[in-house]
Image (cartoon, grey):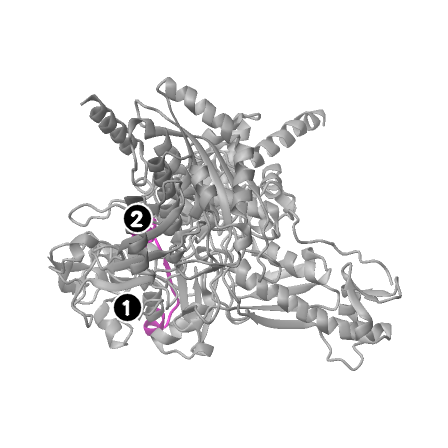
Amino acid sequence: MTAPTTEKFAMGKSMKRKEDPRFLQGKGNYIDDINLKGQLYMALVHSPYPHANIKGIDSSAAMKVEGAVACVTSKELNAYNVGWLPTFHGLDKQMVLADGKVLYQYQEVAACYAETREAAYDMAELVEVDYEPLEVVNNPFKAMKDDVILRPDRENKTNHIYNWNVGDSSATDAALAASDHVVKQHVVFPRCHAAPLEPCGCIAEFDTMGRLQFYVTSQAPHVYRTALFLVLGIPEDKIHVISPDLGGGFGNKVPVYPGYVCAIAGALVLKRPVKWIETRTENLTSSFARDYHMDIEIGASNDGKLTALKVNTVADHGAFDAAADPSKYPAGMFGIVSGSYDFPVAYANLDAYFTNKQPGGVAYRCSFRVTEASYLIERAMDIVADELKMDPTELRRKNFIRKDQFPYKSPLNFTYDSGDYEHTMDVALERIGYKQLLKEQAEKRAKGELMGIGISTFTEVTGAGPSKHFDILGIKMFDGAEIRIHPSGAGIIRTGSKSQGQGHETTWAQIVAEELGLDPQNFLVEEGDTDTAPYGLGTYASRSTPVAGGALALAARKIREKARKIAAHVLEVDERDLEWKDYKFEVMGAPGKSITMKEIAFAAYTNPGDNEPGLEATLYYDPPNMVFPHGTYVAVVDVDRETGETKVRRFLAIDDAGTIINPMIVEGQVHGGLTEGFAIAFMQEIAYDEAGNNLATNFTDYLVPTSLESPSWETGHTVTPSPHHPIGAKSVGESPNVGSPAAFVNAVIDALSPLGVRHIDMPLTREKVWAAIRAAEGQAAD
Amino acid sequence: MNEIPVSIKINGKQVTASVESRTLLVHFIREQAELTGTHVGCDSSSCGVCTVLLDGDKPVKSCTMFAVMAHGHEITTVESLAPGGVLHPLQQAFWDQHGLQCGYCTPGMLMTSVALLKHNPNPTEHEIREGLSGNLCRCTGYNNIVKSIQQAAGVMSQAIPAAADD
């Protein structure tokens, strides 16, 4: 037997991405690149009013446009019983097209179908809608008064959607009352949007067999198939969902949008394929992330030991509760708000309200509200340190959950799997040169210059999730993987996850190649096609590696066990005498007598003996627990006292994502997430004015950082494997977005602290920072 | 409908079609020339995923230019960069340096970079960042795109003397 010629140790290698050649040559296959014969184009009519009754809709002028085919309103949809769709976590339903009234500006009111894109938009311009404006409720504090009931369609005549709480309320209150210090702060995480560069879109066609062929920008194609069955009543075998290459997602491509339903309804009634591609304005106005108004109280002893944590949150969910959260977690994983710290007691309470704003509460590179939670606790830790006159790293060090406390049961009901927070922070402080920075800062402060150092030592919870806790629309949040090995030792890998740029075509091949000792270059990875891929809940919430990645490793091990039997037959030994060693099966006690997986693959199709021929496996992985990545991020900023402009001089991210599959891809994920976190901290907000007008409807008002203002990122890692994940991996895609906003804001506030500034809510635009400096200097002058 | 004949040389091939005068160049490229590597991202000239080269070396945002404005001109798109499947040094560098993730901004980034290096073969990091500032990327954070362009600049400046010898 020859030694394996295949790539060894595929894991942990910075293998170049297998998907890149097509993207580099303009040969990606994104939704708008797909065209079906005879397709119609659809354009939507949007409401200019945030809250209004609809007295009438007149499409007669629109229908006179050359190429006009049809105009559909809620009346037609209701006739087909598809006027409303259930939201993902099942607590609400959402209008497809405005039914009697509009509830937010830009809400979809009518759908126009035409022979060309231009004709469809011409139609949409000409649809006349008679609106009767109503009083606008533009924030949750107004909503909670219930003076105006936004959703009379609901059983309970209130704007209050739900209350969610976790932890021990009375013990927390008692501990706070007994504490030497209680630090309180109101913190807002503003409304923002993931804004992938490719907007959402779809093409719907009912083929000659009456089967729905649905091409759609979906991070969760299988969930869409089941959701479409629930909404439309079409049997699931008659629905084929294809999610092609996605131009980014970051959570924006999880929800089922009204436009999708309109396209399908149009295709059904008009018996032609219907294509709908969002405009950027439609993309920015159809959903949102965050919008949490949080009050935090932290108790501490004189020597800096934390005694209790209490958080009260008011959540603005917009017009419909369209948050894509697991059923039992309406506020997502917000319970991670106790962070990396060993609080003896804690309590978190949240109330969600309807307002006249776009619906959602979907993620923005975030595992279900983890970013809000991490930002809050990391911001608050700095405020506590400030009040106790402690260095923020010392306060953290004193209160970290220690390495020997894992598995750690948090007071808010998570069981953290593993971590070494102090070590990761030490690595970061050493590399950034913390002591020298403090010295430099002291010198600058003496000269009146504003330099800030911001620390964030976050813990994230990802990988939803164990079926005993997690489901969406009742479907448990496991993932499937299927691996087929061909006779030559090449193969195909399919999962229910769906890459949007994360590089699954490369990393999934690396996981399987490592388990089987085969060449990762010779694995085709296929995702996004519900006819071929095994069921899975999709890619969001940093769940792909924790769940689908686990399924892949275990499916590969299943193949290995089958391969053992074939190896035994070929080598004419008992399978118990074989051991998997150095990426091949070796006969124990007979060194040199071995067989590679490549040889076994050939034998599986040519000489399987009494064994079932072929070499393939399908496995569904139900993770036993979530995974808990952590990290220490350090931002160093200089704030211009005269203009309020912040310059991020350095930013270091030390991430602990557990076992690393591909360091190059991990670093790329961190760079991208940090840039999104930078955007959130400094420039992004979907603001509304008093009248309910959305003020961030394009990329000139809703900013995405360019290459000029984006900092250069420094990265590194520590590795604390997850004890329960098959390959010890955790996740990394969202960590930089979860952990970095606090580091940026902490740095700016640290810079301003000599002036007495304690907190500024994001985004920290130069205007806001300038105003805070002026206000502080004015106070000092008084 | 007000249709007028438009003829544009795209990647060396003359493409002629009657289109509405309001037809955007990007739609002409994607639908008449059937070259879908040029994308649409923001409809407002902000993101640059629609960037193509006008008359060889001038990057333009094809979502904010009418097809009629390009009549009689030459347009170069990403599909021209790898004749015969041999990657352009910039494409190779983006691959080597992990300068792309979802790939949606990549064609526009590449075309802007081609023009950048044509006008400035040895740009500093700041010049690269300035040159790219009309092209947004949501995935990479730009670090690796900058590195990619630096790699390509190195490779291409070495290649020039060799070509001159021929």
Residue A435 position (above or below residue B89): above
What residue type is disc 1 on?
Asp
Do labels 1 and 2 touch, CB within 8 Å? no
Q: Residue furthest top?
A: A447
Secondary structure of the residue carrying numbered label 1? loop
Q: Position of residue B116 (x, y in %)?
A: 51, 30
Tag 2 residue:
A297
Which residues lie in the magenta part? A267-292
Q: CA distance from mark 1 to mark 2?
A: 31 Å
Mark linked to residue A92: 1
* Magenta span includes A272: yes
Indicate which label's residue lies in the foreground, 1 or 2: 2
Residue B9 rendering spot, x and y as whole percentages: 49, 41
Q: Is residue A347 visible?
A: yes
Which chain letter goes with mark 2?
Answer: A
Query: Element under label 2?
Result: strand
**Comes first in the chain, label 1 or label 2:** 1
| x, y percent for residue A184 | 28, 44
Depth check: give the residue in front, A495 or A159.
Answer: A159
Residue shown at 71%/72% (left/top)? A561
